[in-house]
Structures are given as C-alpha cells and as structure tokens.
Image (cartoon, grey):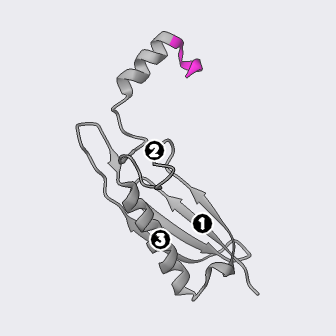
Amino acid sequence: MVRFVGAIDQGTSSTRFLVLDAAGKVVSSAQREHRQIYPAAGWVEHDPEEIWQRTKEVIREAMAKLDLSPSDLATVGVTNQRETVVAWNRTTGKPYHNAIVWNCARTASLARRFAAEFGVDSL
C-alpha cells in the first residue's frame, strides 16, 4: 500500500494542504485564502474559525483529488505563520478573540519600551 505524507501550510494570506508521495514529490494540493482583518491602523487579525474552516476544506479537496482516505497518510506536518497568536477556551475549543497576526503593530510601543528597559537580549 502506498503511503503519503500530508503537509498543512497555514500562511499569512492562505491555507494550503499538500500531499507528497514516498519520494517527496507533491502529488496533490489545494489552497484557499482567508480574510485579513484591519480593526485599526497597523493592526492585523485573522478569524481563527475561518482558518480552521479553510484548513478542513483544503485537506478534503487535496485528498479527494486522489481519492485518498485519512488512513492513506503516514503522517501530517504543520507549518504556521511565525508569531501569530490566538487564545481559546480549553473546554469549548472556541477562540476568545481573533488571532493577532505576526505583522500586527499594536504592541510595537510596548516592545520598544521593554527593549529599552530590559535590553533586547532579554526579550
């Protein structure tokens, strides 16, 4: 039985799923964009529910192209978009707020203050 490897690439502007064969060749893929939310100048957020939905969609789509089932995957790897962060309720699994994206500038002044007060190396 041929086994495949899946890769979730959750990026800043889209989510992609790749299926690779035993030789490491991409044999199927799917990609969907997600919204960029700008609640204030310099702020960037993503809707975590939308990202999760896009992730499920691209996995289904890429797997369907080859008529694969989950048991055909030996493993799945995940890459993500740097320091983007989201907090969620551990009981419900629901996010408390949109994800704060790595390129959001809302904490720039705080980072500068901490760097001046504690030194860059301590950060």
Q: Which mark is residue 7?
A: 1
Tag 3's secondary structure? helix
Q: Earlier in the sequence, mark 2 or mark 3?
A: 3
Distance in Å between CA atoms under marks 1 and 3: 12 Å
Magenta segment, which residues? Answer: 118-123
Q: Residue at x 40, y 55 (%)?
A: 48
Q: Which mark is residue 56?
A: 3
Q: Is residue 44 or residue 87 the one in the foreground?
A: 87
| Residue located farthest toward the top when viewing the structure as drawn | 117
**In the rendered structure, which disc, 1 or 3, sits on the residue that comes first in sequence?**
1
Q: Position of residue 98 (x, y in %)?
A: 35, 48
**Label 1 sits on what residue type?**
Ala
**Of helix, strand and loop, which one carries label 1?**
strand
Closer to the camera, 53 or 35?
Answer: 53
Type of residue at label 2?
A: Ala
Q: Which mark is residue 87?
A: 2
Query: Looking at the image, is mark 2 or mark 3 nearer the viewer?
Result: 2
* N-terminal label among 1 and 2: 1
Could you give the CA–CA distance between mark 1 and mark 2, rounded to whole angstroms?
23 Å
Percent coordinates x, y for residue 37 in the rendering: 28, 50
Amino acid type of the residue tagged 3 in the rendering: Lys
Q: Residues within 10 Å of mark 1 (few under 14, many from 20)?
A: some
Judge the density around disc 3: few (<14), some (14-19), many (≥20) Cα neighbours within 10 Å: few
The reply to whether the magenta stretch includes residue 121 is yes
